[in-house]
Structures are given as C-alpha cells and as structure tokens.
Image (tube, rainbow, N blue to C red):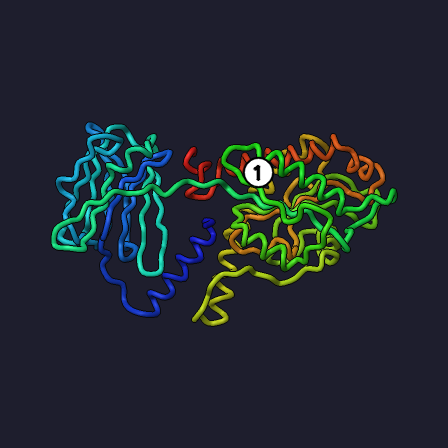
Amino acid sequence: MTPATLALRCLLLVVSLCAAVPATAATLQGLRVVHQETVQLYLDLDQTPVDTRVFTLANPSRLVIDLAESSINTDLSGHDFPKGAVSRVRHGVQDGQHLRIVADLRGQAVPEWRYLQRKNSSRLIVDLGLPGNPELNALSSQITHTEPNAVVRAVVSEPLRDVVVVIDAGHGGKDPGATGRRKTKEKDVNLAIARLLYRRLDAQPGITPRLIRHEDVFVPLRERLELTRKMEADVFVSIHADAVPHKRASGSSVYALSLTGASSETAQWLVDNEHSQELFGEVTLDGLSADLKETLLELAQHNTLEDSIHLGGIVLRELSAIGKVHKPTVESGNFAVLKSPDIPSILVETAFISNPSEEAKLNKRGFQDAVARAIQTGIVRYLYERAPPGTRLAARQ
C-alpha cells in the first residue's frame, strides 16, 4: 500500500469517527516483536491515540513509547527475550490516563514509526533500525486479552516485498502514436525503450518491474490504469516520444500530472493529442458526499503529485547527463495515463520524433539503452529516498 493510499484511508477514518461518535481513549490490545531485516515492534490498538511520542534513552539503552489517553488490557511485565535486540518490554501509566511502553534494548536504536489504519483498529509500527534475525521470531511474543491471564503465542514474520515499478510503453497496435519523417513509429520506439528499462530494473535487487504491454498491441487508456492497479504498482512510468509541429524542437522532457492545467503551450498541445480523460482510479469512498469524495481525492492526488514531481526531477537530471533536455524542470499536463491518485507517476518524452536528427537517434540501440539507463538510475535513486513501507528497499533505509 502506498503512502498516499494510507493518507487517504487515514482521512477517511478521521471523517467517519468525527461523524459517528466523540473520541474515546485508545486501548492497547497486543504487542509483537518482529524480526525482519530490521527489528520492529507492532502495537495493535482499537484506535489511534490522540498523541504519540517515540524516543530513546541511553545508559542503559531503552525505547520509550508514550500513548496519550490510552490504556492496556493486559500486563506486559515478566516478558523477557533471551536473544535479539529487545531484551524486555514493560509498561506503566502516567497521570492515570497516559500509557508508557518501555523496551529494554541490547543496542542503541534509531527509531522510525508510523500508523497503519484498519477498519476497526490501528497498528503502530516502530522500526528500531537495528539488524533483525527472522529465526528469532519464534521467540517473539504476542500478548492478547482473550482470557483473564495473558496468552503468549509464536509470531510469524510478515515478509518484506519488492517495490513494483510498472512500465507503460505508450501507444501500440492500431494506435501508432507519432510518426517521424523517416516513417519511424512512436509505438515501436516506446516499446524498445520500455523493454530495455524492464531488463535493467529486473536486475536491480528489491525491485520487480512489470510491463503494461510486452508486444505491439493496443491497450486502451482506461485498461492501462486498471492494469497498473491490478499489478499493485508503487511507481508508474510511461514512455513516449515527443512530436510537435515545429521540427526544431529537441530534447527529453518529463511530465507529472497537473491538477490545474498544462504548464506550457507544448504541454497543452501534447495533452490535447493524448486524449485526456478524467479518471481517478478505484478508491473506496462509499457513504460520503460527492463534495467530500472530491476533496479527499484531491488531497490524495496532491500528496502523490509531490512524489511524482520529486521522482520526475531526479529522472530529468539523469536524462540531462546523456543529452539535451527540452525544459530544465518537470512539466505538468492533464495526461489520462497519470490519473491514479495514490501512485507516483511520470511520463517521459524521450526525444522529439518530429525532429529528423532526434528521430535518427531514437532508432539507435545505443541511445535507447542510454535513455533506459537514465530512467532506471533516477527511479532507483528516488526509491532509496522514498521507498514504500514494508519493502526491502525501505528496510535498507
């Protein structure tokens, strides 16, 4: 699940809670110590506390989690861990209403934390930043309040996953896209670069690439969006080749979705010729008014747009290292293929097929591979900064 999806679902939870009943105290219902590539604490609550603080103390090393206006329905005392980064977990109550969890550590942690929202519960995940050992998961304990006395059970680790990058080769089949003076078809160039990018990303640890089309077939815009969501994309990149009436135009460009209109006349011309549609992906917003649905989708898209622009800027810098760029910054346009509200998405115009000299370059394997390498490098650099939670690349951060 992408950060924008989490943000949207969090907003939905807040809306539903505010509309239903006044806020009540949160209750800690379970705690787990999980060993993945790093050691993590999972704290399961019936709802998100009104305030959360996570910090460390030294001499001895301890992790402290303060949950405001919260309680616990079982006793954590006496649960020791003979091996691993966490040696003991205990709790206390401050001022009669604030819950404090303390984990004694065998190393100095650099914690990061986040909440995952569920339908009727909330999970606080605290990553200690300390090396994990999955073999120790059998020693981890989960404390629940199913009976008067605490029940201790073995825990199965939730495996880390690869980041999924979906690559869309623009046009295809009966839709050739633009055609150069030498009869070069944009659909063929797009597919060639997409395949090269796929091979490069497939060799990258922690990344699984997916292709929207593997061959010369027509895929409608709506179906491209549906396939992107079915593939559970974390990042989406669409490959194209520019064409404008002015044959002197040259250089690579990178576009992100615009919520207010195209950023230049060239961008607007391209949008008008890419059959722009108003599509927002499939996010469940049942039971909300039309105005509220639109507001929540706009918030999600603004959050994703910031990631898209950041990704596009990195890719654009890599492209500038192999040749000319048409504009020094990421441009924006209302491209239908970029409409998923929770997936960072960019459209790369590799060169101007309407420019005879650039058309010649687009037909050369060396230039195609250089473009694929630049896009690959940009995506990898972006992911090392902003990999989605629960992925191998995020754990390495």
Please name the amino acid that badge 1 sits on: Ile
Residue name at image x 59 percent, y 33 percent: 377
- Relative image position of residue 176 (x, y in whole percent): 78, 51
Query: Looking at the picture, how far across and down is residue 117, in whole percent?
Result: 36, 55
Q: Is residue 51 visible?
A: yes
Image position of 345 (left or right of 390): right
Mark 1 burial class by Cα count in 10 Å: few <14, some 14-19, many 20+: many
| x, y percent for residue 180 | 84, 45
What is the x, y in percent for residue 44? Answer: 28, 51
The residue that appears at 32% across and 50% down in the rendered structure is 123
The secondary structure type at the circle numbered 1 is: helix
Residue sitting nearer the eye, 190 or 55: 190
Instruction: Let me know if residue 110 appears in the view.
Output: no
Say which of 148 and 250 sits in front.
Answer: 148
Q: Which residue is rendered at x = 87% and y = 42% of the image? A: 182
Q: Kindly indicate the quadrant of the structure image that contains residue 225.
A: bottom right
Residue shown at 58% from the left, 48% from the top: 345
For residue 244, above or below residue 220:
above
Of the 4 image quadrants, the one containing the C terminus is top left
Question: Along the line of sight, which residue is nearer the eye, 328 or 97?
Answer: 97
**On the rendered structure, is 392 left or right of 53?**
right
Look at mark 1 in the image and give the residue it sits on. Answer: 379
> In this picture, is 105 found above or below 151?
above
